[in-house]
Amino acid sequence: MTQTPHISVQHLNVHIGAQHILKDININIPDKKVTSIIGPSGCGKTTLLKSFNRLWDNTADVKITGKVLVDNEDIYAPNAEVTHIRKKMGLLSQRPYPLPMSIYDNVAYGPRIHGIRKKQVLDELVEEQLKATGLWNEVKDRLNASATRLSIGQQQRLCLARGLAVGPEIILGDESTSALDPVSTAIIEDLFISLKEKYSIVLVTHILRQARRVSDYIIFVYMGKIIEFGPTEEVLLNPKEELTKEYVKGYIS
Amino acid sequence: MKKRKFEELFFRILMVLATILVAGSFFLIVGTVFFKGFHYMNLDMITKTPGGGFYIGKEGGVLNAIVGSFYVAGGATILGLLVSIPVAIFINLYMDGKRFLSNTIRMAFDVLFGIPSIVYGAFGFLIMVYFGIRASLLGGIIAVTLLVIPILVRTLDEVIRTVPFELRDAALSLGSTRWETAKVVLRQIRPGIFTAILLSFGRAIGDVASVLFTAGFSDNVPTSLHEPAATLPLAIFFQLGSPVEEVQGRGYASALILTIIVLTITILSDILIKKFSKHKI
């Protein structure tokens, strides 16, 4: 890779209780590309993703060592400011979790807590992000309706718009389409592909077809270790490691 | 095969009977209060304070006790919420790494939950003696606040625990501080806060023992926190103990008033809960 990595993970170890979940992870996540983390359930995919924006901070018994550099800044450094780090990354979880407020307020929530108060600015931001996620035409007449009234696919796009509204650089997706129907899944996947022009995207997925459709790079994780990392076609069609081969063919899951 | 069918029928009948028994006793209680009290129910009961010969069956009402009860239960619920919301938020959102400590606090509140209200009355009385407060509205509110805090904390705690972790993660991922995340959680549990208020108010307005030494009793509507205040449960207790038939009847009428208040609050909160759960995930 010639370009500078956006996220650089160095000797990351994660323990939850007595379990050693992630073992000496070293990886460079490329800038403005879609990178998918694949691997069998329980291998540590989500743990890895959540360690990128310090979401483990609030969980008991989690011990993290090593470095995660975002824009060359170690987010686990003692003086790192956590809200500033999280603002850089939008998270799209397995199921949509809209905030208990209206559609408009969901998108405006992030900008508001970061100090934007002017209604005109907020209006523009909300419209822009709802357009970016293709929701604008569907919701423009009911921006004050509760976000929970939307279909689950629309809610997931709203959650994406909400995340984009704080102006992140990175989008983290944790099996973001696993609760959605095929049509909504396709919409979200297309969004990821179009958003990589502006954002670096890291996805956790257990659907190999999805990984192949949307990602430029693939990380294969097995038993808490990175087994293989490379361009999508290479990892999926021409894996170097025996374990990757077995996983891609469906022998291990 | 026959045995299974018989079993099915047997337990079905058992469940139906149990349901009838419980639902029936509810109607029996409300019915008794209604029939015994309705005859003595009149506008004076709720608009007048006891007159000169009230306790031998002459004119007056229990306005003093109605207002006193609202003051005590309302004051205690508000004071209780001011303490309980921060506690519930703190043990759930700020003590993540300290599960042992937060569970110990939970257990402490469980124990407090089970303490009989007379103990709170006695404890409140001790506090009053220490600070030189006489039996008064303030004393009653303090004792009842102690009584409702465990109810409020445990109810709010249960409700906060139903909020999915992912919702907190969502707020945190947008760069929220803990307090901003807590505000999102509080919004999410608004219906639950109403439930807690209802439970607390219902318990507070019906409790006798905690106000027995602390609030005192007065035939006047209290005009300041330092005056003694009557409460409905005590009014019922005193009136039912009277040998005069008229006064006993009014005791049932007072019980009817208390029942109606509690039922109204229940129904009202039910409507409010529905109204505020529109953002429910």
Image (cartoon, grey):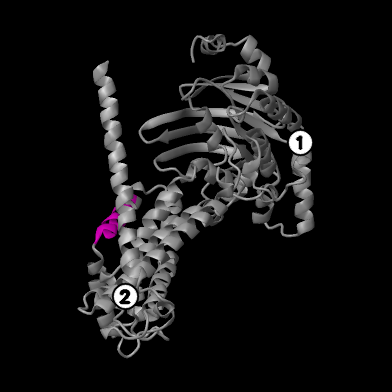
Residue at x-position 28% and y-position 42%: B18
Looking at the image, which residue sits at the far bottom?
A: B52
Image quarter (top left, top right, bottom left or bottom right) of the N terminus of chain A: top right
Image vertical order of residue B60 relative to residue B269, above or below = below
Q: CA distance from mark 1 to mark 2?
A: 67 Å
* Viewer-closest of A245 and A66: A245
- Asked if the magenta segment contains residue B198, the reply would be no
Image vertical order of residue A175 relative to residue B166, above or below = above
Amino acid carrying label 2: it is Arg
Please report, as a chain letter, where disc 2 is located: B
Q: Which residue is mark 1?
A: A134
Using the rendered image of the protein, determine whether residue B184 is visible from the camera's viewpoint.
no
Q: Image quadrant of residue A197?
A: top right
Looking at the image, which residue sits at the far front?
A: B39
Q: Main secondary structure of the magenta part?
A: helix
Q: Image quadrant of residue B238?
A: bottom left
Q: Image quadrant of residue A189?
A: top right
Residue at x-position 30% and y-position 89%: B53
Using the rendered image of the protein, determine whether residue A144 is visible from the camera's viewpoint.
yes
The magenta stretch is: B103-115
Residues tagged 1 and 2 counted as in contact (Cβ below 8 A): no
- Residue B225 drawn at (x, y percent): 39, 83
Amino acid carrying label 1: it is Gly
User: Label 1 neighbourhood size at 10 Å, few (<14), some (14-19), many (20+)?
Assistant: some
- Residue A166 drawn at (x, y percent): 69, 47
Mark identifier at residue B250 = 2
- What secondary structure is found at the residue carrying circle 2? helix
Mark identifier at residue B231 = none
- Residue B231 drawn at (x, y percent): 34, 75
